[in-house]
Amino acid sequence: MDKEYRLLIIDDSAETVAGLYHFFSQKYKVFTAPDGMEGLKLFETETGNFDLVITDLVMPYISGVGVISIIKKKYPGIPVIAITGWGEHPEALATEARADVVLEKPVELPVLDQQVSELLAKSQARLLATPMK
């Protein structure tokens, strides 16, 4: 039986969240949050955690850079894709926070889908290669 991957999408744009949810929920179990704070709460309270996070960079309460930093510190193996439509060099901040991929809005869904698939495959391969303790 194939694993059902769990994605967390964090973005303060309801339109973006709805579009990504609709697109990805056909393949994955998708959870959404309207801002970084809610995203981190979901991350901590949702049993089973998440296999991949897609987060906007510019949001109220806590930025995507903050979200990425916190997730990567606690769960370094979980892939994170940062998406943004703001700033001159947002990829520098996202990369510094250890995002695995940075994409600019508007995101092309086939490109995002390919990145998600590749990151999940790499993550799964790492898990399978890691000896049990």
Image: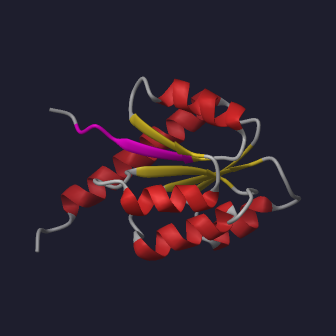
Where residue 49 appears, as percent x and y from the top left, is 34, 55
Q: In the image, is 61 to the left or to the right of 40?
A: right
Residue 133 in percent (x, y) is at 11, 74
Kindly tell me whether residue 74 is visible in this rendering.
yes
Q: Nearer the viewer, residue 41 or 128?
A: 41
Residue drawn at point x = 20 percent, y = 56 percent: 128
The residue depicted at 58 percent of the width and 28 percent of the height is: 110
- Where does the N terminus fall, quadrant-wise? top left
| Residue 78 in view in this figure | no
In the image, which residues are magenta?
A: 3-9
In the rendered image, residue 113, in percent from the top left (x then y), is placed at: 52, 33
Residue shown at 38%/33% (left/top)? 28
Front-lying residue, 100 or 50: 50
- 14 versus 63 height, above or below: above
Seen from the viewer's position, the closer of residues 111 and 50 is: 50
- Relative placement, left or right, of 108 versus 32 is right
